[in-house]
Every structure is written in structure tokens, then in C-alpha cells.
Amino acid sequence: MEALDALLNRVSLARLQEPAPDAAQRELLFRAAMRAPDHGYLRPWRFLTIEGEARQKLGELFVSAVLAKNPDAPEAAVTKARAMPLRAPMLTVVVATLQAGHKVPESEQLLSAGCAAHGILLAAHALGLGAIWRTGDMAYDRTVAAGLGLAENEQVVGFLYLGSVEGERRAAPELAPADFVKVWS
């Protein structure tokens, strides 16, 4: 796939099914991630892959987070939290590892980790895989962060759900650049 095709036609796809990316595809996904802009060569990212039975374990971690915030959470909220990781055969947790006090501001380090996540999404599209970047409450929850083994200087950038496309791949919406670009003088 041509680079411009991936850039212009990538879309988020929520309906994912087996198989998950294979070993060769994963290698390419993570190599693409590591091409993210990285001022200072800090490599302010790391990745956790979750698949198979580990998805159920992540669902139970999500349930723990829901119940920690609200011990009387409705059963529907508990059921939803438990099922979230089962929406794709593989999840990649993109983690920003931030260095405080460095000449590169933490905000720039976080953006770099976000670019790494975007690199994975672009590579997935180029490989014919489906992917979607999700955050939500679980991405910002300290119970989840602790359960994933994150250090105090780390945070979840997003959960990338990856798999094979279920059904038809939808087309990217047409947006007019003129609606978003203005000349400053």
C-alpha cells in the first residue's frame, strides 16, 4: 500500500474479529510506532499486548476499577466493563513513559507516544487489518494503571483494538482542508 493511501484512507474500525495480527505483522506495527517524532530521542513509549485469556483478565481489572469508584455500580456497568476487552482479538496498550524535568516538556513526550499509537494504526491499515484507538475512563484510571504495572511517571495513551475487519471496510469521510487551514499573517 502506498503511504499516501494509508494516510488518506485510514479509518477506525470497531467491528473486529479473529485472527489477530500475526508475528510478522506485529513486528511491522511496532517498527512503524518507533518512527514517531521523538525530540531528544527519549523513546517515551512502551507497549503492552493483550490477547487470549489475558483479555478476560483485563476485563476483570476494568470491573475492579468500576467498583472502586462506585461499589454500588449497576450490573450493566459491570457487564460492559468486563466485555470491553473482548471486542477485538488483540489489544495494544500504548503507554507514555514521561521524564520529568527533561528539556523536552512532558507534553511533547506525551504527543510523541500518541504519534507512536498513530503509527500503529496507519501500519495496521496498510496491512489490511482493522484497528480502533479507544480511551474512555479506563485509560485514565489509576486502578487500571496499577493493574497494568505502570509506574507513577507513566500513563495510558490509549487502548488500540486490533484484528481482522468484520464486514465491509468503511470509506474515510471526505473533509475539506480549507475548513481547517487558514493563512496567518
Image: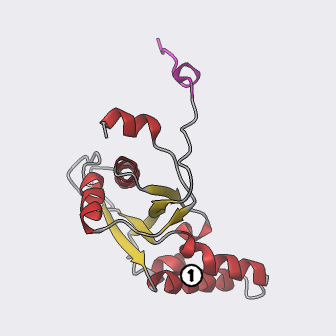
Residue at (57%, 86%) from the top-left corner?
60
Residue beneath disc 1: 59
Residue at (66%, 80%) from the top-left corner?
66
Q: Along the line of sight, which residue is nearer the eye, 178 or 129? A: 129
Q: Which residues are magenta?
A: 175-185
Residue at (39%, 51%) from the top-left corner?
128
Query: Is residue 169 highlighted in magenta?
Result: no
Q: Residues within 10 Å of mark 1 (few under 14, many from 20)?
A: many
Q: Along the line of sight, which residue is nearer the eye, 20 or 46? A: 20
Q: Is residue 73 visible?
A: no
Q: Residue lying furthest front in this view? A: 167
- Image quadrant containing the N terminus: top left
- At mark 1, the secondary structure is helix
Count of picture labels? 1
Q: How is the image coloured?
A: secondary structure
Q: Along the line of sight, which residue is nearer the eye, 167 or 50? A: 167
Image quadrant assignment for residue 33: bottom left
Residue 177, above or below 38: above
Image location (x, y in percent) of residue 10? 46, 43
Residue at (41%, 56%) from the top-left corner?
129
Q: Is residue 60 visible?
A: yes
Q: Is residue 103 left or right of residue 8?
A: left
Kind of residue indicated by mark 1 = Gly
Q: Magenta stretch: dominant SS? A: loop
Q: Is residue 176 left or right of residue 116?
A: right
Image location (x, y in percent) of residue 76? 76, 79
Query: Is residue 179 highlighted in magenta?
Result: yes
Q: Residue lying furthest left in this view? A: 41
Q: Is residue 129 left or right of residue 68?
A: left
Image location (x, y in percent) of residue 136? 60, 63
Image location (x, y in percent) of residue 156? 45, 66
